[in-house]
Image (spheres, helix red, strand yellow):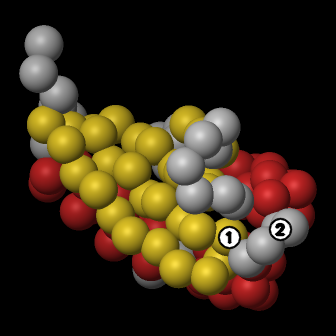
């Protein structure tokens, strides 16, 4: 099993807007049966950090999900018009779950 964390550094003061935008994105994900992501925000460290954490059975499952997301016009329109304008930078972290 793997955990994928998409870590976004938001623009200063944009956390509330990012949370609201993500709620809109969740509607799209549910409509298309995508796996749920857990949203995490900072308590310490870099301010305005927004993390999306998802779990997959393996890298192949992650790749399949990513291809579906990126190929979905509705997701792309939402992501680039509502979420990306709030983001300063980002990165992806991937971990193997050790039971």
Q: Does 57 appear above or below 17?
A: above
Determine whether, in the image, residue 5 is placed left or right of residue 96.
right
Disc 2: which residue? 14
Q: Is residue 15 above or below residue 91?
A: above
Q: Residues within 10 Å of mark 1 (few under 14, many from 20)?
A: many
| Residue 33 appears in the figure | no
- Give the residue displayed 69% in from the left and 59% down from the top: 48
| Residue 21 vertical position relative to residue 80 in the rendered view, above or below | above
Mark 2 and mark 1 residues within 8 Å of each other at the beta carbon? yes
Q: Position of residue 28 (x, y in %)?
A: 70, 58
Q: Where in the figure is residue 37, as x and y percent of width and height?
A: 53, 42
98 and 54: which one is in front?
98
Give the image quarter of residue 32: bottom right
28 left or right, relative to 89: right
Residue found 41% across the figure and 42% down from its top: 54
Query: Vertical placement of 7 versus 61: above or below?
Result: below
Residue at image position (23%, 51%) is: 94
| In front of the other: 52 or 30 | 52
Residue 36 visible, this orientation:
yes
Per the model, the C-alpha gap separating discs 2 and 1 is 6 Å
Query: Residue 10 shows which numbered tag?
Result: 1
Neighbour tally class for label 2: few under 14, some 14-19, many 20 plus, Cα within 10 Å: some
Q: Position of residue 96 (x, y in %)?
A: 13, 37
Q: How many marks?
A: 2
Where's the C terminus, which quadrant?
Answer: top left
Task: Answer with the quarter of the image where residue 10 lies.
Answer: bottom right
């Amino acid at each position: 099993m793997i955990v994928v964390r998409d870590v976004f550094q938001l623009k200063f003061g944009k956390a509330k807007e990012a949370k609201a935008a993500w709620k809109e994105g969740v509607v799209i994900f549910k409509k298309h049966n995508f796996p749920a992501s857990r949203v995490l925000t900072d308590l310490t460290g870099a301010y305005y950090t927004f993390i999306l954490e998802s779990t997959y059975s393996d890298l192949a499952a992650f790749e399949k999900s990513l291809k579906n997301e990126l190929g979905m016009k509705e997701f792309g329109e939402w992501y680039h018009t509502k979420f990306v304008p709030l983001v300063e930078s980002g990165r992806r972290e991937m971990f193997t779950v050790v039971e």
